[in-house]
Image (spheres, helix red, strand yellow):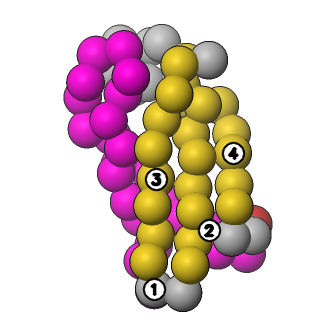
Amino acid sequence: MHDEATYLCDACGEEIVVPIDVSEGSDQEYVEDCPVCCNPNVIHVSVNGDDVRVWAEPE
């Protein structure tokens, strides 16, 4: 199982690494500020077996 994944910041396009905690469920959503440009992103995490998908949308 993956313990981290990446997403692209919606504001600056930087690739950001985030930890994956499967104990939080298979569909997760939370807000995180980009460590590069400080703009908030809504982070979506979808876990389906060994497949982990992470993407961001503007808040």
Crowd rating for badge 3 (residues with CA inside 10 Å; few <14, some 14–19, many 20+) = some
- Amino acid under disc 3: Val
Q: Amino acid at mark 2?
A: Asp
> Which residue is label 4 attached to?
29
Determine the CA span between mark 4 and mark 2. 12 Å
Residue range in magenta is: 1-23
Q: Secondary structure at mark 1?
A: loop
Name the amino acid, label 1: Asp
Q: Which mark is residue 38?
A: none
Mark 3 near mark 4, Cβ–Cβ under 8 Å? no
Which residue sits furthest right? Answer: 24
Q: Which one is in front in this view, the residue at disc 4 or the one at disc 2? A: 4
**Marks 4 and 1 in Cβ contact (< 8 Å):** no
Residue under label 2:
21
Task: Identify the secondary structure beneath mark 3.
Answer: strand
Disc 1 crowd rating (10 Å Cα; few below 14, some 14-19, many 20+) is few
Was residue 11 drawn as part of the magenta stretch in this picture?
yes
Q: Quadrant of residue 59?
A: top right
Q: Is residue 6 magenta?
A: yes
From the viewer's perspective, is 10 left or right of 41?
A: left
Reading the chain from its start, which is encountered first: label 4 or label 1?
A: 4
Q: Which residue is mark 3?
A: 54
Of callouts 3 and 4, the N-terminal one: 4
Question: The residue under label 4 is which amino acid type?
Answer: Glu
Q: Secondary structure at mark 2?
A: loop
Cα–Cα gap, marks 3 and 2:
12 Å
Q: Label 4 vs label 1: CA separation?
A: 19 Å
Crowd around label 4: few <14 · some 14–19 · many ≥20 (10 Å): some
Q: Nearer the viewer, residue 21 or 58?
A: 58
- The residue carrying mark 1 is 50
Q: Residue 27: percent from the left, percent from the top?
A: 69, 61
